[in-house]
Amino acid sequence: MKSIAALQAAVTAAAPFDGEPSDAELNAIEVESPLILAEVALLDAQIMTIDRAPSELDARRIRRARRRVLAARRDLANRTAAATETTASGGAA
């Protein structure tokens, strides 16, 4: 029977992980943060109405939060598409 220590090299053969996100990961989070914040706001609006029937004000708050999520998704998709086109074409024309 092999001990875990004997298998450790095979398991941890990948690049060393220092526990911190890379610069690329931090940049991706920063780009996606408006969408993340909009989704959190929508979740907050929905959580407020879990234990009761939503009032008209609650319904408006949820609709506004959904629109913010959709707008943030649209903006992120457009930004990603623009970056992909720029990269694929070799630069701005």
Image (cartoon, rainbow, N blue to C red):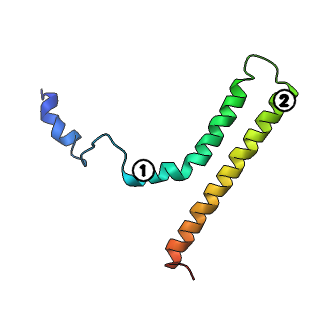
Q: What residue is drawn where x is 56% and y is 72%?
A: 85
Q: Identify the amino acid type marked 2.
A: Leu
Earlier along the polypeptide chain: callout 1 or callout 2? 1
Residue 27 in the image, given as x and y percentages of width and height: 46, 53
**Local crowd at mark 2 within 10 Å, few (<14), some, or many (≥20)?**
few
Choose top left, top right, bottom left or bottom right for residue 24: bottom left
Residue 38 in the image, given as x and y percentages of width and height: 65, 42
Report the Cα–Cα distance between label 1 and label 2.
38 Å
Q: Nearer the viewer, residue 86 or 33?
A: 33
Determine the residue located farthest toward the right in the rendered image: 56
Residue 39 in the image, given as x and y percentages of width and height: 64, 39
Q: In the drawing, what numbered circle is on residue 25?
A: 1
Choose top left, top right, bottom left or bottom right for residue 18: top left
Residue 57 in the image, given as x and y percentages of width and height: 84, 29
SS label for mark 2: helix
**Local crowd at mark 1 within 10 Å, few (<14), some, or many (≥20)?**
few
Q: Identify the amino acid type marked 1.
A: Glu
Check disc 2 and report the residue beneath it. 57
The reply, left or right, for residue 11 in relation to residue 46 is left
Reply above or below: 1 against 19: above
Q: What residue is drawn where x is 82% and y is 31%?
A: 59
The reply, left or right, for residue 80 in relation to residue 66 is left
